[in-house]
Image (cartoon, rainbow, N blue to C red):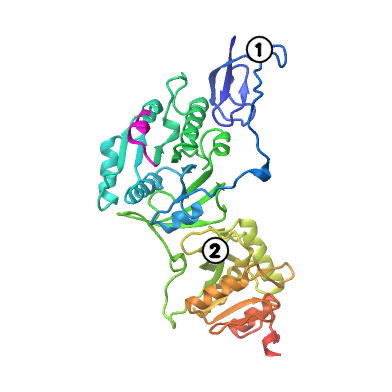
Amino acid sequence: MKKKTIYKCTSCGQEHPKWQGSCSSCREWNTLEEDDVINAPSGGQKGINKKKNVIINRLTDTVSQNSDRIVTKYNEFNRVMGGGIVKDSVTIITAVPGAGKSTLLLQISDDVAKQGLKVLYASGEESDSQIKRRAERVLQDIHKNVWVYSDNSLNNVLGCIDQVDPDLIIIDSIQTFVLEEYPQRPGSPTQTMECANTLLKVAKDAQRPRAIIMVGQMTKDNELAGLRALEHLVDAVLVLEGEEGEELKQLFSTKNRYASTGELGFFSMGEQGLTPIDNPSEFFMTQRDENDVVSGSALTVVKEGTRPIILEIESLVSTTFMPYPSRIAECLKKDHVNTLISIMEQRANIPLHDKNVVVKTTGGIRLKEQSSNLAAIMSIVSSCKNQGIPNDTVFIADIGLTGELKKVPTLELRIRELERMGFKRVYVALNGLKSTTTFSTIKVIPCKTLSQVIHSVFGTSSKGKEEKAPWDE
């Protein structure tokens, strides 16, 4: 068969008949690499071998099997994975350099080894001694069931798999490995996809299933490097967020065939590696005494996956000396902040046209839910009035452009978490809860408008006149 030379983009995978400076699809420069393909025989279907005796089953007759899982001692990792590592799965984890992905996988490897399973840690980036030094730093004792191999030849790694017969295989990272059958350099789309396909066959072997976790490099746009086909190939894609030097690390999945993608795991990076944060609410709010009330702080409850998390929103309002005041938010989009400020000015009569407004969250978590809108506004109002909100008070509601409070989903679950943590009052939207729902130690205060909430918390109406709240009627 005749070979044909094409040029494939390493960023998006688009094929080009000849070399050019930039890819016509993604507009990236210097990303085209030479690749050889074999032309298929001409003549339509001629030359294609069709197998006739293929075993096929009806879906109704197919037996459903639950895949076994390897459960680690790291509950936050298990939560994101859906209960543990599936024994015949391929997972890829990606993060910016220095986020701690290799450290996390080394800790998981040691824990799996202590359960009596064999682990092969293959690295194409670090030497054996470098891996050993990191293990001595983050692990109390290294289990003998962890095997390490440093080489970028996947052919040699496959030989190690036959020799060790591991239950868990770590590949760090997939973009550094090559198969000798292909001439392309490490990290090229062909090498990466062929290596991944080979590992997939190893994991899905019906006679000897194995769990494989691959490290994937991240591009400057904070995306998994390589073709999108790599994400389609694997069973789960994990992302570890957190810049180098930051203590808080967040683990979540953008794809998971065995669990929901909404779960979020929290870790704290220290000298002993990554430590799971089992109660993230304590990490995302400032611990203060009952009488230590500060202005510009309000609490809310967000839902990450199936878990409610109590979160503190902080605001700072200051007088501007420029024609256009600043609107700065690390946790919200700028348009979102401007919308909330417009609602405050029009519906609550709080002038902010000559004020700078800065909004952030404790711990740096981004606000994705509309349920935090009321708390964000109340933190701004608190800073503007220079009056603190009691530390046992929480706000859970969305705000409409009319200034009315809107109910949010799973409100009862959020309030139950507040009750468990010892909070005394929570402001919600009118008719946000069922009339039959009762709580023993927390007072639920339903409100119809933003003005009623401000009047109840600060004692004066935001519109300059008394406005009765529904609980006072």
Taking depth in this image into account, of 137 and 383 the one nearest to the observer is: 137
Q: Residues within 10 Å of mark 1 (few under 14, many from 20)?
A: few
**Is 160 one of the magenta-colored residues?**
yes
Label placed on residue 99: none
Q: Mark 2 belongs to which amino acid?
A: Val
Q: Confirm whether residue 124 shows in the render.
A: no
Left or right: residue 378 compared with residue 470: left
Q: Mark 2 points at which residue?
A: 359
The x, y position of residue 106, in whole percent, is 35, 46
The quarter of the image holding the N terminus is top right
Left or right: residue 442 compared with residue 217: right
Left or right: residue 383 compared with residue 142: right
Q: Check the image and name the residue furthest to the bottom.
A: 473
**Is 23 one of the magenta-colored residues?**
no
Residue visible at 51% across and 31% down in the picture: 197
Residue visible at 55% across and 52% down in the picture: 259
Q: Name the residue under label 1.
A: 41
In the picture shown, does residue 411 fall above or below 324? below
The x, y position of residue 334, in whole percent, is 61, 56
Residue visible at 52% across and 28% down in the picture: 189
Magenta range: 159-167
- Under tag 1, what secondary structure? loop
